[in-house]
Amino acid sequence: MAVAQDHVPSDARSTSPFWTVARRDSLAGFLFIAPQLIGVIVFVLVPLGLVFWYSLHEWNVLANTFTYTGSENYRMLLSDPSIVRVLGATAIFSVGLVIFNLSLALLLAVLLNQRLPGITVFRTLFFSPVVVSLVAWTIVWGFLLQKNGGINGMLLVFGMEGPNWLREETTAMISVIVVQVFKNVGLNMILFLAALQGVPKELYEAARIDGAPPFKQFRRITLPLISPTILLTSIITIVGSLQVFAQIAVLTQGGPGLSTTVLVYYLYQQAFQFHFFGYGSTLSILLFVIVAVLTFAQWQMRKRIVFYES
Amino acid sequence: MTHKRTLTSAMTALAVVVPLAWGGASHAQEAINLRMTIWSANEAHLTLFNEIAAGFKEDNPDVTVTYESLPFDTYTTALTTQIAGGNAPDMAWIFETSAYDFVASGALHPLTDTLTATEGYNLDEVNGTATERWSQDGALYAYPFSTSPFGMFVNNDVIKASGAKTPAELIAAGEWTWENAIATAATVGKAGKAGLIIRDFKYQMWQNLASVWNGWGASPWGEDGKTCTFAEQPMIDALSFIHEAAFQQKAMPGPGEDVDFFAGNAAMTITQISRASLLPKDNPFDWDLVPLPKGPAGEYALIGQAGVGVLAGSKNAETAAKFIAYMTNPENSAKLSQFFPSARKSLLNAEILKKTNPLLSQEQIDRVVIAGIEAGKVIPGHTGFAQIQQTVRAGLDSIWRPDADIPAATQAICGQIGRMLQR
């Protein structure tokens, strides 16, 4: 730096240079984050702003009209007779998915957290659906879940007549949840597995010496120490559950009735099938608010449910 | 001096290059590329379309037409997304169910002037029923290039094996009614194969049920399109008949059961005649094509349509309209009718249809194709049809179970779509 200052003309030395060390560091910092920042601005913030702008308009694509309607779409949202059922279906799907996914992922992680020969084969087996194409996975499940499909065929071998999985309201929702859980449980399982392997073994040894049974060890040692991962996986799973689309589109198309019409699918119908792009944008804003509130709430709850934060 | 010479050389070069560049630019402006979105990716279809495009290019060397195949199931969604994204095609195929939306919204360029001005086009020979939903205020906005009647394909092998009467026998005895058709289907159902399949219905595409309920004189809404008639007695009777056939008599595969007629697994299927191409060539079965059975309201026919129109926003709308006029002129309509039956009277004769549909017998062409196109009602459609379709689909879901309350369900449907019908 001193060398650089030697080259500054003597008449400029009296005023402080523009490129101070702090400014240069700031510029370097901004340049480093620029690619990410530009991506976020172009692909997240600008579309978000546009969606809000569209939500204040009635956009008829076919007639090529774009009319400012103010809060009309928001008023329509409040009086939409279907929205309560849609939000109900979304809540049932999200709660069911989170409970089933996290429980199964944790169970699998605990079972697979053993030093046994060939255990990596099982880990790979349970993780493999994560890398399978979502639509292909769902189509195959669609065949299996038909009334005369593979699952009912297997049940028939044991003398049981299976339900019409995708055509009855209760079983349709359960089917969609199960298909989604089996698709993604491997990801949460791997995260839990990594967390479990990070728990110090000495704690279990000490607990055993103190006479703590296995379940107590799990509740008092394992759960608290993997709580940051539980928070992470629950946030990822809840946000993911609110974005479910392909499974609904392929398996049930929102039916029977509106029983599996979750918010994203309803949004798709309104915007892309019924051509109500303005109202579809309003539903997008609603989805954004729900995701933001849930994530914020979970983050605020971390002090209660997370034992420590690294 | 050197500078002066350089300047002179540069000016001379510019004087030569600029007019050339301008000429090149103006030539490029004359080249017109037209794009048509279609829902077929069939190789034989595309070969014929490209042949027609090449024929047009002979007279219009600056015009190039390309076809973009979009997936059938999501065709209209993909098309409107292209329009919303500012990437609208110049021309597009349009489903009969979406016709009202496209015509009423002003999304299409009027075709009447171009078609009537085209020498030898003879638009008058296309009957008014065929063009009704593609017109507004006397102007035609899309040309119905495909007018395909619904018929019933029959697997005589499966029916004979069950001991039931075949449709041909029932027709010969003057007993081809819905009661007897379902009795045959139920007998086949009890023998282990599927009875009757209403193709593509799958307990979701309810508009295909018009192939049955038209026999009861039922319709989802009144002639004016403003009044819901779902809850009226003819519709309740027709839906009760279908319900009983599916759930009590087991004459139709139930919801969630996927059976393919063309694989030889069912006695009968209702579909458009263009599906004859799906009949198995290896290991064929003894098949027949018969008209739809007579219902309590008498004999009837149903047709499906596909239209082709020019998007009003196209920069080359006039040229695109000329291409539509060429593509659907009598000569090219005759070529197209091997895949897409034409509504032109001159092409509605057994001799021509036999040439273009070699799989069908003379009798089948007379009874199903010609009679169907001449007398058939078009499958239901309405402005805002996609929303109405989904709302009715959700409402009808409560019917497709053994313990259904059909009058209550249809009443609820009318309550839900009443406001939509007013648009």
Image (cartoon, grey):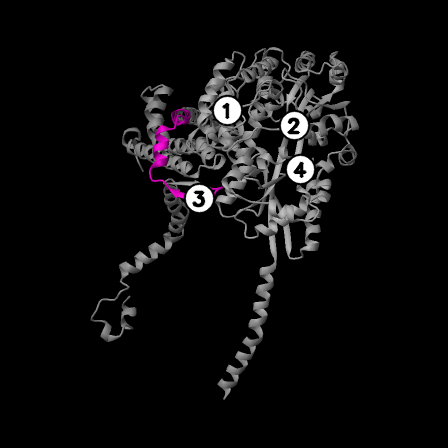
Amino acid type assigned to the residue bearing label 1 in the image: Val
Q: Which residue is mark 3?
A: A65
Disc 4 versus disc 3: distance between alpha carbons? 33 Å
Q: Is residue A144 visible?
A: yes
Between marks 3 and 2 in the image, the one whose residue lies nearer the viewer: 2
Mark 2 secondary-structure assignment: loop
Q: Which mark, residue B376? A: 2
Q: Are marks 4 and 2 on the same chain?
A: yes
Left or right of B73 on screen, residue B166? right
The residues bearing labels 3 and 2 have C-alpha atoms spaced at a distance of: 36 Å
Of marks 3 and 1, the one in the foreground:
3
Where residue B42 sits: x, y (%)? 67, 39
For residue B217, what is the image quadrant?
A: top right
**Distance from Cα at disc 1 to Cα at disc 2:** 24 Å
Mark 4 or mark 3, whichever is nearer to me: 4
Rendering coords of residue A308 (x, y %): 30, 33
Which residue is rendered at x = 65% and y = 21% of the image?
B197
Label 3: element kind:
strand
Q: Is residue B276 left or right of residue A180?
A: right
| Mark 1 or 4, nearer chain start | 4
Please give the residue where the numbered disc 4 appears in the rendered image. B126
Chain letter, disc 1 residue: B
Q: Is residue B375 magenta?
A: no
- Say few, some or many: other residues with alpha carbon within 10 Å of mark 2 (under 14 / 14 to 19 / 20 or more): many
Three-letter amino acid code at the position of disc 3? Thr
Chain letter behind tag 3: A
Q: Amino acid at mark 4?
A: Val
